[in-house]
Image (cartoon, coloured by chain):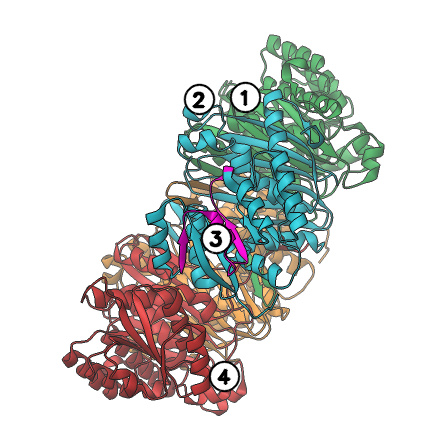
Chain colours: A green, B orange, C cyan, D red
Amino acid sequence: MNKSAKIGVGVIGAGRIGALHIEHLAQNIPEAELISICSLDAPGVKSLAKQFNVPKVTTDYNTLLTDPQIHAVLVASATDTHVEISQAAAQARKHVFCEKPISLDLEQIDETLAIVERAGVKFQVGFNRRFDASFMRVREAVASGEIGKPHIVRITSRDPAPPPIEYVKVSGGIFLDMTIHDFDMARYLIGDEVVEVYAVGGVRVDPKIGEVGDIDTAVITLRFRNGVIATIDNSREAVYGYDQRVEVFGSKGMVKAENPLTDAVTFSGSEGTRAASPPYFFVERYKPAFLSELRAFFACIQEDTPPPVTGNDGRAPVAIGFAALKSLRENRPVLLSEV
Amino acid sequence: MNKSAKIGVGVIGAGRIGALHIEHLAQNIPEAELISICSLDAPGVKSLAKQFNVPKVTTDYNTLLTDPQIHAVLVASATDTHVEISQAAAQARKHVFCEKPISLDLEQIDETLAIVERAGVKFQVGFNRRFDASFMRVREAVASGEIGKPHIVRITSRDPAPPPIEYVKVSGGIFLDMTIHDFDMARYLIGDEVVEVYAVGGVRVDPKIGEVGDIDTAVITLRFRNGVIATIDNSREAVYGYDQRVEVFGSKGMVKAENPLTDAVTFSGSEGTRAASPPYFFVERYKPAFLSELRAFFACIQEDTPPPVTGNDGRAPVAIGFAALKSLRENRPVLLSEV
Amino acid sequence: MNKSAKIGVGVIGAGRIGALHIEHLAQNIPEAELISICSLDAPGVKSLAKQFNVPKVTTDYNTLLTDPQIHAVLVASATDTHVEISQAAAQARKHVFCEKPISLDLEQIDETLAIVERAGVKFQVGFNRRFDASFMRVREAVASGEIGKPHIVRITSRDPAPPPIEYVKVSGGIFLDMTIHDFDMARYLIGDEVVEVYAVGGVRVDPKIGEVGDIDTAVITLRFRNGVIATIDNSREAVYGYDQRVEVFGSKGMVKAENPLTDAVTFSGSEGTRAASPPYFFVERYKPAFLSELRAFFACIQEDTPPPVTGNDGRAPVAIGFAALKSLRENRPVLLSEV
Amino acid sequence: MNKSAKIGVGVIGAGRIGALHIEHLAQNIPEAELISICSLDAPGVKSLAKQFNVPKVTTDYNTLLTDPQIHAVLVASATDTHVEISQAAAQARKHVFCEKPISLDLEQIDETLAIVERAGVKFQVGFNRRFDASFMRVREAVASGEIGKPHIVRITSRDPAPPPIEYVKVSGGIFLDMTIHDFDMARYLIGDEVVEVYAVGGVRVDPKIGEVGDIDTAVITLRFRNGVIATIDNSREAVYGYDQRVEVFGSKGMVKAENPLTDAVTFSGSEGTRAASPPYFFVERYKPAFLSELRAFFACIQEDTPPPVTGNDGRAPVAIGFAALKSLRENRPVLLSEV
């Protein structure tokens, strides 16, 4: 593809993440040109289009897929539409950036990846945290051998507040909705595959979460093929804010990413020293990462290189999530080969 | 002014800071509409205009001042043109955002402020650091009484590398080029006026700086009318990066802003623990502050409120700078009333 | 007991920990009077006695147990002698401070605790880390409700270097030698009992450790009766030094203890900022805690209060250790009721 | 002197610092033997002697100076007796450790140093902060060239609470009582002599301090012979605790010592993260440094090497203090050669 030409882009889905992608495309990504937005919310999408000077809007994603100006689509619609849209887009020879998870059905994921493969288009999954500056630095310290041979990974991932119960009901459960990012992070940091999962958890934050069959607090142990052990802890509610830390310990040292804070100020008074809190939630914390993942997607199209987050990277955390769920239910370690 | 209408803006000067303002206007400030750019560098300005979809370009700022679409101008040209352009703009009834320093001549500053006053337009000076999230938090802790009655201010301000000697020659010297920001910061944090200055300094970094009559290392003591004492230290070269810290100590506590770091990662190895460096220099560090100061400027136009950085705020640090220079030369504390 | 009278003390065992107790008794504990030291190393114990002005030495602990000047004994001999000596001491009506572990045999522990109970003497186990200022502060934040209802405990415990293989062989394995402290810490911080254990681990540091049937790297998950989940990670070799951190996360916040550092100095150069390392190993790190645990032991004698670390506190971590070992071997979660 | 023989020591003065030295001598310094304590407070000194097993007590320091068992004396009596006692001790061929300041009279100091010189005894001044682990590390980073050529020193030194007014009256003023430590620290860190001083200050904490002719808040600028500039800030009252920080900035980097904290714990709640406070005051903070300075004193006797803090090191900060006082009164920089 002509490197200097702008890549025509369509965005499907204009919820929280879709709108963020639209903003980034309109303002911060000169290598792409946002041609069209598709959303079932017709008035909302018109308003967004006006705000960001997007020439076309539609409520039917097929309109967008047949648009010759459009070379790539961003799939940010509801999870249960990802597979259908991604497949249709690939068959229409559009490059696809698909929000996570591709699907909550491993067979559908496999089918989608096969279709993408045959179509020969790029397919990148929206694991945005891989593009966080701190986590990239941690990955680099592992990949470069700076910490030697890795032994142990620790990931803490706690949300500031639980989502609405209606969302919890359809989320696929904490492992597929929340921990999926941590499963991806563990794989990203170590660069190897998980072979076994053990999960424990409970309902500590809100009994309603338990009533709909989910848990809100969990500790998960992962064993990697290469012997590395990872431990992940999750909570749906950390009152001090979005807590996203990782640590990799190895034979030559330890690298860890602490939470960034909203400012670099401390106040010292008669009751000790107080520092700021982390950014409130994922949009605030990962805004630069959301931007970087899109730029990486367009770069892989322009340079015809493999996407930095592959289809398999999209599949593996879902499989781990199912293994975790099975482990929780059966209270035993579960092999990935079992799911 | 109609709050919903966009404010037409012209930018005069398209160097490093001018280009940053242009980028911000084009991408991040929906309340303004960038109409025209003026620069003596005709090809450069055309390229910028194309990149950011700016409809008009000119090499003559008068063209811009007579443009009825333009309500406000940003003066980011060479320092020795600030006065002439600001005065002309005010007389053309354009609101003026003027980069610091307004001038290196106090009489010319006074004349400009008088003209602005008579014209009834807004006039804001580009002391961007006041809009840094950390420094705003420090100011708030002082203004709200959180630290009680302030006693001592400490400001460290060190550049990562000295500017070219050609720049140093015309810069007005370290106090008017570099410390001027710290003089402003001290006034901002304390909310009171400096009455006396004592400066010591020397040439430690580069003998060439001494050869052109300037210094590169300085410690300045300020006495405020309300008894607060501030100490500022400057260097033209900190090998560990742009060092910008402030601390205010008072009867009920101390508030301080440390340097932000480029990531939140530490590496622990056999030689201790290593953390990241601060952002390289002022563009990287203060990008959000440069954006916020523009938004504040447009807000004061839309809401017809006083600008957050006034003409007097632009004048005072220049006067302090002259007092510091006199102090350095005569090796004695100098009253502001002497300059 | 007369509060103002000094408590006569005998120390049995004069290895690394025994010698430290002797030093503390001689120099820092005015409420006790060190009467006699017993060690099989006759010349070594004489030299120690001379250095610290201890009036009596013996190679037979029975001499010490029949000494009417002695009211309390510190058992710091080899692990496999703890039970015999503790029982004899209790039967001789001496208060007993016994180094951990009491024994690697749960039945023997039970027998010992029963004898102690019948004798009516104080019996405290040497879980020194409970007396570390930082961990006490963490415990207090949990006990006082400052963090609300606790949900998750994270403990990192890594040694700077593995012990000699000869030691590993007789140590009882990593869980009973090293993790036992972390099992105690988890119980201490949460104030409740562990009901289930899951352990994974491997040989990452030194193949020789594997050859003698042990592991050197482990991650252990504990479930408490009250629903709290703890995750512990261990390594026999952290090149950056002794790594001892705990974190408790709850409904109202998180409290954590980072490693102390040997100084409060940072160096910032062109490659970022460097901080100091933690104290080298347990003697350096926990010296004040070793002192405090002794003072607490003497206080419970003087005030006739229960010891701060009870016999059950000595038994429980051994049981958890056996459950962990079983879990590792059978690769499944193991209930405490199974051991 | 025979290295293996214990050095017989007498302590003159048993106030706060004297008592601390006595405790250290009795418990932590095997190379010395505390023979006698002299204090005008006869009952107090008897109680101390009993507590620490000191064989002799006296209310007349001459008794102590003629004691053949005593080879070295620690002068920890009231400042106005330092000269008389130090001179008498040197003439009695006792090595002298003298608390700071030697005297508030430069001529008397010179006379004392001359007598000490003639007597050929060791004479060390009690600038304990030089023995703080963090400050030693900073000094090392300067002396070894790690930070390159030093340019700027920043010292913050603030007490947690002002002393009683009766003490302030006879203290010699803030510069000779409090800043004297910082003058010493600056000289220690840079290893060169101060040539000029500029001081500003005021009464901010307590008007009573002003009424007795002193100030409680100060900022002092020092120029060194080698061009380094130091800035010191002082306050008699920091509500967040004893604040003792230093920073040296040079051509290759910056080294700084932050305050140590009483524990390594942080609590994160809905209002941000809270850390501990520094140790309350100088006894808590500098206990290990007070111990180290004594050990260094005895080492210089045993090894017949120059004391680590010389007579000139005791004199120079007093001279700087007088220059600071003159500067404050005359509001101008004062050369050391003027005092």
In the rendered image, residue C244, in percent from the top left (x then y), is placed at 51, 44
Considering only vertical position in the picture, is A241 above or below A181?
Answer: below
Q: Position of residue B167 (x, y in %)?
A: 33, 55
Q: Mark 4 or mark 2, which is nearer to you? A: 2
Q: Residues within 10 Å of mark 2 (few under 14, many from 20)?
A: few
Q: From the viewer's perspective, is C298 left or right of A46?
A: left
Q: Residues within 10 Å of mark 3 (few under 14, many from 20)?
A: many
Distance from disc 2 to disc 3, alpha carbons, whole Å, reads: 41 Å
Q: Which residue is mark 1?
A: A307
Q: Measured from the top left, where is residue A69 in percent x and y?
A: 63, 21
Label 2 belongs to which residue?
A: C211
Answer above or below: position of A59 versus B63.
above
Residue C74 covered by magenta stretch = yes
Kindly give the residue lying farthest to the left in the view shown: D118
Foreground mark, 2 or 3?
3
Per the rendering, the mark at residue C64 is 3
Circle 4: residue type? Val
- Which residue range is magenta in the image? C55-80
- Identify the image quadrant of the C terminus of chain A: top right
Callouts 4 and 2 in the same chain: no
Which callout, 3 or 4, points to the residue nearer the camera? 3
Residue type at mark 1: give it. Pro
